Amino acid sequence: MSALYEFCLRMGDSTLVLGHRVSEWCGLAPVLEEDIALANTALDLIGQTQLWLGLAAEVEGSGKTADDLAFLRDVWDFRNALLCELPNGDFGQTLMRQYLFDEWHLGMLKALQGSSDDRVSAIADKAVKEASYHLERSRDTVIGLGDGTEESHARMQAALDYLYPYVGEFFIADALDDAAAKEGIAPELNSLKAGYDAAIAATMNAATLTLPESKFAHKGGRTGRTHTEHLGHMLTNMQWLQRAYPGASW
Amino acid sequence: MYAQMVKSTGEGVKARADMSPEEAAFQDKIDADIKIEPKDWMPEGYRKTLIRQIGQHAHSEIVGQLPEGNWITRAPTLERKAILLAKVQDEAGHGLYLYCAAETLGVSRDELTKDLLSGRMKYSSIFNYPTLTWADMGAVGWLVDGAAIMNQVPLQRTSYGPYSRAMIRICKEESFHQRQGFHIMMKMVEGSEAQKKMAQDALNRFWYPSLMMFGPSDKDSVHSAQSLAWKIKMDSNDELRQKFVDQTAPQAKLLGLTIPDENLAWNEEKGGYDFSEPDWGEFFDVVKGNGPCNTDRLAARNKAWDDGAWVRDGLLAHAEKRAARKTAAE
């Protein structure tokens, strides 16, 4: 399969899976403004998924649609970063996951604005505005809750400790990532790392949170080598109607 | 309309001769369609009735996210998922405008929330019914939002300025909600046998609860008479229910679905449909807390509020720290 196809799946599956997770919050947020913001974030991510998976389907060229890719593939075909599929946990864990993703996502999208493929750069141009807003909000919330009460601080530290081992995957390239970089479709993954590390160090400092010392990284989601057990349950829910009524139009 | 059986003063409409000069001037403004604004003088009964009505409407928007949230994670396509997310986001936004409108009457959002969570204030009975299949997302948009619009459109002209302005914004979004619901139903009836069955089943379950949304007949209600005089209520419950049936019956026919009412028939003489009343016994059971989902809905709201306490406290503590640091630096 082409590097472009694979790259689109890696972007689109991450936005799909994270968008789905965030949508699970509907109506259950701590305050009304957060309900609106969470729904808005989920909506943006699902919108981006339509573009990435739409492009993947176009590149693949066998007449599939973005919906076919989203609803009719099983776990082993998903190419999202593992971080995105981890459960919501409490509100702090959800926002910490969002922040760790947004910081990478915005850096990636900015680099993709210079992609050699016009379709990729067009998606990045649209998504970069949304991701900037997501980052602003998730960063402010992480700082606010980290530097809030004793309880909120402890919860945010626990969230960071749980999630941090999943960020390294964003920067570990395989042969397909190298091919995408070589073709100028996407940046070298490692080129985004210094900026990311500096940004999260500054945020955690402002949030009075401590980054874990271990740099161990769980990986395998983006390459499809493995996923967590959580993804299968999400797909069971997400894909249910399409699976139960094959071929129906909705 | 998401407010039902809102109590007013209970004393009926005051005769002009019994009004104080302030009350007479107030009624004159209302009769002349001049909006009442937050700083204007208003009778205590007007203020209290509005708080009850706007509060109940706001609560309905908030609780109303739950039956649809039940299907966001199972929406069958990316587009349907995006539309449903946009819709529930709108509903949370409606809740926000309405709480803000209520706050101009001297009650805080936290106080209203407390009353919702304790069960002291109500939300619309319709949200105590379960959403069992994807077709229910169609039925909720088509019938529930359709019924809501019937009342909200005239309320754009209501006498209280902030409420009227909130309603104008809300109405713009509600018509999109109703259209997307009808569109879901259209796709279902054009689809497989199973989808058609799902659509008919959704209509069967949501028809009478939708008729109940307007509340029981209020032609003899002293509360409604006062609310009508104050232009807090613009039409009687029966008038709105009739309008709703007249609008919806041809739509059901277009969809090829059967409204579950053997008595539904066009009445040439009155220029509207005859139809059966819903089971008002069931309605009062739901209002008293005995609907299929009352316990679950209230428990979900309470859990969200309780689980979120540490977040609200944390963000407040941070804001205070920042303010203190800013003061210290100056």
Image (cartoon, coloured by chain):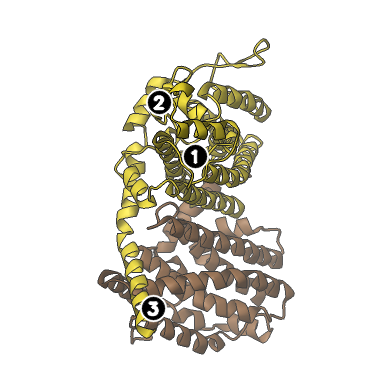
Chain colours: A brown, B yellow
**Residue that carries the numbered disc 1 in the rendered image:** B133
**Residue that carries the numbered disc 3 in the rendered image:** A164
Image quadrant in which you'd find residue A204: bottom left
Identify the chain of the residue marked 1, using the numbered disc in the image: B
Residue B163's x, y, as percent?
A: 52, 43
Residue B91's x, y, as percent?
A: 51, 48
Q: Amino acid at mark 2?
A: Phe
Task: Tell me the quadrant of the picture where the C terminus of chain A can be found.
Answer: top right
Q: Amino acid at mark 1?
A: Thr
Residue A169's x, y, as percent?
A: 47, 79
* Distance from Cα at disc 2 to Cα at disc 1: 23 Å
Same chain shared by disc 3 and disc 1: no
Is B295 in front, or is A60? B295
| Crowding at mark 2 (Cα within 10 Å: few <14, some 14-19, many 20+) | many
In the picture shown, does residue B55 fall above or below B251? below
Mark 2 or 1, nearer chain start = 1
Task: Tell me the quadrant of the picture where the N terminus of chain A can be found.
Answer: bottom right
